[in-house]
Image (cartoon, helix red, strand yellow):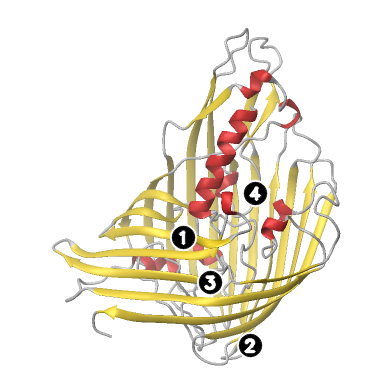
Amino acid sequence: MAEMQSQMEEMRDQIRTLEEARKPSVRNATFVVPATTDSVSSEAAGGDAGATTAKAGTTATTNAAAQTASTPAQSERSLDIYGFAMLDAGQDFKSIDPNWYDSLRPTKLPSPPGQFGQNGNTYLSIRQTRFGVKGVEPTPWGDLKAQFEFDMYGTGKDAGVTTMRPRHFFGQLGPILAGQTNTTFMDIDVFPNNSLEYWGPNGMVFIRQPMFRVMPIQGDTHLWLALEAPGQSADLGLLSDRIQIQNIKARFPYPDLTGQYRQATSWGYLQLAGAVRNVKLDDTLADQFNLNQSIMGWGLSVSSLMKISKDALHLQYTFGNGIENYMNDAPVDVAPIPNPGNPARPIKGKPLPMWAMVAYLDHAWSDKLATSIGYSQVQIQNTSLQAPTSYHLGQYSTASLTWYPFDRVMYGGEFQWGRRTNLASVSANDYRLQFSFKYTFNGRIIGAK
């Protein structure tokens, strides 16, 4: 399946570029943050434009709720710009794929050891820098909302390049949203509020892609359903040189179906999300084999944000088959397995089972000092036909200290650690220190201020 792999990997890159989603440096997750945190309102559904401001020890509305809260029609149109300039400066004490020098992704750690040369690298990057525009236009059916947002983090074919990358491009009228934004399978509020590393916890559901979303229930408690752009990728493993595999073409006859339900509580919320998908494998080679196949993928995710005095605990557990491209940092979705007893189809594709988790604590030391500390991992159930160097387990952990001297300014430092373990149990570690400097802006161009 080399051509299939190339085709699916290209589609995967396109989707994650329409993502690759980041995966942002989302300093906007909700909750307990110093009162001087930069605040960029995120009223449009699916937006993650900036931090929700709250005095230390208090609780702000979660992003997801703020994104879809019902509001009365405005008396006039409005247009706002927002964003921030950000510098990340760090020391990587190990090595990583040079295209990902300023982020810590376990999938990009060396396999085998020494793949990316000697250890030790200093980096300075402005790729987290962000710019966005959002507007509101009154209509007979209520407010029409639209949002466009870029950062400078090249992915896919632009991996390693400082270039404009689309994050959010969507419009919303009432309960209907159309465009590109965070997948409905995702809970943006799981992202730790004071983390500095760009990509974020590897075990978090995180991707942006085109969709059509219906939101029949909006507000703190909500229900969303969506049809989203499909896509998967494959690992041909030990069979990558077989001509029979190379002539299999991937086809996506249906959009992915996703949904989430969030129940708000006095202590935070509890959310359940799901995704279902289908891919067809078409055997285009006229020989004695019939490798045509239909593969189903599915996933479930449970998440929560718990408010505990001045702390906020972010939790998520995700499991399923063939949903790896929905994860913040995971490998392929499908791999070959033997199919004994069927000489016409000696092998078939298997949606890889996986599970992932995130556990992060946000703590406000004062009105100006805050910390995020936690751990995340993704584990894959590999097949016997995958190579020994195939990705099996990824682990990720960070601990930060951020200082907000006054409104719209943030300085911080963070220790970051990651580990990749292959199918053959060979591991690669990475650890680094990063210091970040962030200057936020926002303003209204049209409408009352």
In the rendered image, the residue lying farthest to the top is 288
* Badge nearest the viewer, 3 or 4: 3
Counting residues from the start of the chain, the first of labels 1 and 2 encountered is 1
Say which label, 2 or 4, has the lower sequence index: 4
Badge 1 or badge 3: first in the primary sequence: 3
**Image coords of residue 282 (percent x, y):** 53, 21
User: In this picture, is 447 found above or below 245?
Assistant: below
- Residue annotated with mark 2: 365
Dividing the picture into quarters, in which one does residue 339 lie? top right
Are circles 1 and 2 on residues that touch, CB within 8 Å? no
Q: Which residue is mark 1?
A: 167
How far is mark 1 from mark 2, CA to CA? 32 Å
| Residue 129: image tag | 3
Q: Position of residue 125 (x, y in %)?
A: 64, 70
User: Distance between the Cα atoms at labels 1 and 3?
Assistant: 12 Å
Query: CB of mark 2 within 8 Å of CB of mark 4?
Result: no
